[in-house]
Amino acid sequence: MEYVSVKTLHVTCVVVSISLFLLRGALQGLGRPWRNSRVLLVAPHVVDTVLLASALWLCWIIGQYPFVQGWLTAKVLALVLYILLGRVALGRSTPAARRWPAFALALLCVGYIVGVALTHSPTWGRF
């Protein structure tokens, strides 16, 4: 596959992954039993696996790697924070008072990751 095809796959997975996170967060906030849906339990793992694989493939194609280039390092670190916050936001045992702040902070992480991806700069090219 060429760069454009892999990037299209990657961006599509980003949109689907964020959409699934928003859907699960909204259903949780509404008190709906989304964990009873096999699709909502399995699909995020499948999509995120393809997302990660396409990210690694893009790194290989462009010859830029995390912990070598600052912008990719920033994306990886923000991704780890997003995963941790997402676990808190969607966790069964998380008190309701902690879910919404974690959900909002996770979405801020996603926004930051997208900004870094678009600018190839950990500061979005501002400094």
Image: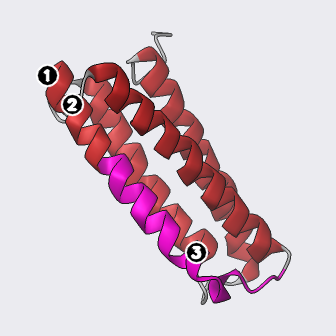
Residue for point 36% across, 20% down = 4
Estimate the spatial distance between the alpha carbons at disc 2 and disc 1, rounded to whole Å. Answer: 6 Å
Q: Main secondary structure of the magenta part?
A: helix
Q: Earlier in the sequence, mark 3 or mark 2?
A: 3
Q: Answer yes or no: do the residues labelled 3 and 2 have beta carbons within 8 Å?
A: no
Q: Residues within 10 Å of mark 3 (few under 14, many from 20)?
A: few
Q: Earlier in the sequence, mark 3 or mark 1?
A: 3
| Number of the front mark, 3 or 2 | 3
**Which numbered circle lies on residue 63?**
1
**Which numbered circle lies on residue 54?**
none
Q: Residues within 10 Å of mark 1 (few under 14, many from 20)?
A: few
Residue 20 in the image, given as x and y percentages of width and height: 62, 59
Residue for point 46% across, 11% down = 125
Instruction: Report the front residue among 11 and 109.
Output: 11
Residue at image mark 2? 59
**7 versus 49 height, above or below:** above
Instruction: Report the front residue among 2 and 96.
Output: 2
Over which residues does the magenta segment extend? 31-52
- Can I make out residue 5 in this image? yes
Amino acid under disc 2: Cys
Residue 56 in the image, given as x and y percentages of width and height: 22, 40
**Which numbered circle lies on residue 39?**
3
Residue 118 in the image, given as x and y percentages of width and height: 48, 20
